[in-house]
Image: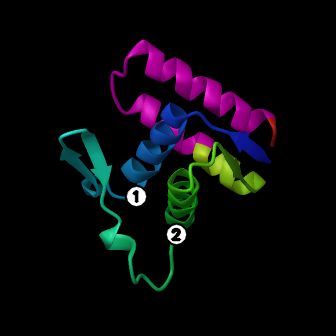
Amino acid sequence: MLLQLTSDEAVLAIIALVRAIDPRMLKSDTDGFTVDFTSLEGKQALSADEQLLIKLRIGTESNSDSLELADAEAQLLAARLERLEKSGNWPTDVVTMSRSLRSRLTGAV
């Protein structure tokens, strides 16, 4: 499926995946946060979460607003977003954005 993403949705998806992989990858900085990919560099085999995170990274670095996802990747991302929603008390706009994104991900699968 071809998934159109706003920059905010891409950030939310990245956060959802990082929280599932290793929350220590999120580093605070002056602009909010960055993702430290050092732990993935040189790894022989990447998990499905890690592969999807790399795919998102490449898409955002190339300023692409769309991402081609296999059905399994769409389902995985939807599950990670749902897990993120349930992990804390998020602002209403973040939850609304996550649910909208999950709906698009699961509706096309």
Residue on which disc 2 sits:
47
**11 vs 45: above or below:** above
Is 105 above or below relative to 34?
above
Label 1 or label 2, whichever comes before in sequence order:
1
Q: Is residue 103 above or below residue 32?
A: above
SS under mark 1: helix
What's under tag 1, amino acid-wise? Ile
Per the rendering, the mark at residue 54 is none
Asked if the residues shown at circle 1 and circle 2 are in contact, with their CB atoms under 8 angstroms apart, the answer is yes
Q: Secondary structure at mark 2?
A: loop
- In the image, the segment drawn in magenta is 78-107
Structural distance between the alpha carbons of marks 1 and 2: 9 Å
Main SS of residues in magenta: helix
Is residue 14 magenta-colored? no
Q: Give the percent coordinates (x, y) of residue 41.
A: 38, 77
Crowd band around label 2 with a 10 angstrom C-alpha radius: few (<14), some (14–19), many (20+): few
> Residue drawn 58% across and 42% down?
79
Residue drawn at the location 56% of the way across and 56% of the way down? 62
Give residue 86's position: percent from left, percent from top: 43, 30
Residue shown at 20% from the left, 45% from the top: 28
* Disc marking residue 21: 1
Q: Nearer the viewer, residue 66 or 77?
A: 66
The residue positioned farthest toward the top in the image shown: 92
